[in-house]
Each structure stands twice: as structure tokens, then as C-alpha cells.
Amino acid sequence: MQRSVFAVPARPRKTDTKSAGVGGRGPIANAISRIVRRLGRRILILLAVSIVVFAVLRLLPTDPAAMLLPPNASRAALIALRHALGLDTPIPVQYLQWLWHALKGDLGSSLQNNQPVAQQILAALPTTLQLLVGGLLLGVVAGVASGIYAFKRRGTRAEALAEVGNGIAISIPDFLWGILLILGFGIALKWLPFIGSIDSGYSVTSHTGFLLLDTLIDGQIFAFGNVLLHLMLPCIALAMGIAPPLMRILRSSLLDVYEEEYITAARLRGLSGPEILRIHGLRNATLPALNVLGMQVSLLIGGTLLIEKVFGMPGIGSLMITAISAHDLPMIQALAMIYAICVQIVNGLTDALEVIFNPRLRFQ
């Protein structure tokens, strides 16, 4: 049979976007492109934060040059020092000079002791990082465990008690948890130390700046245990800012997931309850919990400021409070940027994990 001249020629097959991605790119390329774009936005945010912090500090009625000179210094000495520090130039020029030096690692000198700001921050940063890591680990473990427990006991009195306890915990700020823990476990029961990073009877050589690592390097097991005891109360106080909201969102996400049809299909295939929870429940409830965790960790970074002051920890939080009381503008400016960088790093990691765990984002 002859083919009709009016036959419509076959159209070329479209590329499957599920396998090739948008624009012919694969899912890995799409994921990398999305992560790079979000990283670029983070860098722009940091630049904007630096401009705002620099401008606000320059509006304060404080002259850094006058703080460096004795009260009886002459007007000529003040003018000469302002010129040497570049304070007599326009604020945009001062900002560009500061940014150029900051990118090279030079954050200026402290007005309190004339020591390099970067050196003091590097000395205090390990203490803050130990608190952050400890609080994060405790908060995630407690939040996930309590969320799964409340979900498994849904419809029972245990779930109601867990909700009441969660509501109470989420209403108390981190620093108030710190005070309550000191009063309860430090003063009343005298179970745990609550001042400083280590007892004065121990002498530890600083190798890395991290006391936990330095005690192990020195082979001082009892000193290592003492540092852990000092970290327990502040880390628990920080964890209380993570666990309650994480528990609530994880439980709610699991309740939503178990309304889906694939959970019913998994039951019909004969999967046990723990298998369904592990394979389908937790995997699909991860993304909402991950987003909440990223936000809470960002708040946790700022929460270390008061926690360190409450527990007498020599971290960057204590450094910031001291700098504010002394109007130490170079130190305040540098520490504000350190906090902003930490927050953006956490948000960037959250974005990357969201792209990794959410297949739909890899095809957009």
C-alpha cells in the first residue's frame, strides 16, 4: 500500500526531563547549578550585612581615635591619629579600605588592648564552636527521639504529656534555661560545674585551642572528663533551643506522611511498623525538619552570646559583650561579621542538603 502524501511526518521524541533535566542537563548538573546560585546569594547577603554594620557603627557618637589617646591629648595629636587611621576620609572610602584589609585577614586592632582583632577571635572561637557542636548534637538527638516517641504514642496520654512538655520548653529562652540549670544542678544539687571551661587545678597545653582535643593530646583523661562536665550545662541550655521545635515539626510531618497512599501500600506489602517508619516515614519527613533545624541553628549561633556570659565561657560571645561595653568598634564589627558568616554557612549547608534530599529540586 502506498503511503499517503498527506501523512504527517513523525515528530522527534522529546527529551525526558526526568532523566536529562532542564535544558538537556542531568540532575547532578542541575543540583550543582542550584547550589552555586544559592551560594552566590549568600555572598551578596554577607556584603550587604558588612555595609549595614559598618554604616551603623560609624553613626555612633564614638571617636575611635579619641579612645586611643589619653584624656589630656592635644587637638593636633587627635587630628594626626585620625589621619593615620584613615578616619578623616569619606565613609565609603573607609568601608572599601576596611573590606580590602578584611579580605586579606587584617581585621584591625582592638581599642581596648591594641592587640590584633583576628588573633583574639581565633583564640576565643574554639570555645564557641565546642558549645555549638555539643548543643547541636544534644538538640538533634533529643528532638528526633522525642518527635518519634510522640508520634508512636499518638492518641495516648503520653502524646498529650509530650505536647505539654514541648510547649513549656519552647516558651523558655536559652539563657533562662542556663540560669535554671545553674540553680538546679549547679547550686542546689551541686552535681555539675557551671563556671568556666575547666577547673583551675588542671593545666593543659594549648595545641589546637579546643580544650577537649588538647586534653586528649596531653593524655590527661581526668582533665578531659572535667571539660566535658563543664560543657554539659551550657550545651543542654543551647539544645533546649533546638529540640522542642524540631520535635514538633518532625511529629507533624510524620502525621502528614502517614496519610499518604504509599504508606497504605507499604502495609499491604507486609512491611513492619519500624520498616515503614525508617524507609518511608522518616525519609519523607526529613525536609520540613531540616528547614526548621537550619533556622534554629542560626538562632543558636546568636544564643551562644548570652550562654557564654552566663556560664563564664571565654568564647566570642563574651568577647562581643566586653567589646560592646568598651565601645570597641573594630572588635564589634569583626565579631558581627563572624556571626553573619556562621549563619550564612549554616543556611548554605541547609540549602545544599535540601537539594540533595529533595529529588524534585534536581529537575527544576
Image (cartoon, rainbow, N blue to C red):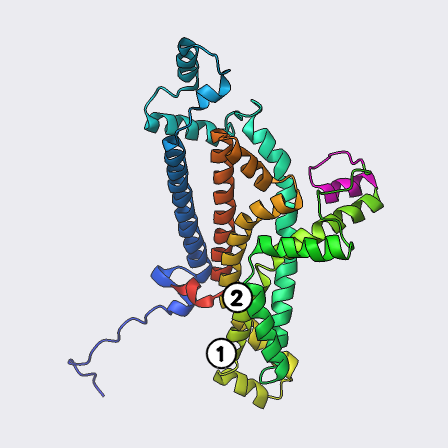
Residue 68, given in percent of the width and then of the height, sits at 50, 19
- Residue type beneath disc 2: Ala
Residue 123 left/right relative to 20 = right
User: Looking at the rendered structure, which numbered label has been put on residue 256?
Assistant: 1
Residue 33 visible here: yes
> Hey, which quadrant is residue 162 in on the image?
bottom right
Q: Earlier in the sequence, mark 2 or mark 1?
A: 1
Residue 352's disc number: none
Q: Is residue 344 above or below residue 149?
A: above
**On the image, numbered disc 2 is attached to which residue?**
289
Q: Residue at x 52, y 79 (%)?
A: 255
Callout 1: SS: helix
Between 209 and 175, the one lying in front of the other is 175
Q: Position of residue 315 (x, y in %)?
A: 62, 40
| Residue at x-position 73% and y-position 34% | 206
Please indicate whether residue 86 sits to the left or right of residue 215 in the image: left
Range of magenta residues:
203-219
Q: Position of residue 224 (x, y in %)?
A: 79, 46
Tag 2, which secondary structure? helix
Label 2: how many Cα within 10 Å (few below 14, some 14–19, many 20+): many
Question: Do the residues under discs 2 and 1 have CB atoms within 8 angstroms?
Answer: no
Residue 277 visible in the snapshot: no
Against 213, residue 160 (above or below) is: below
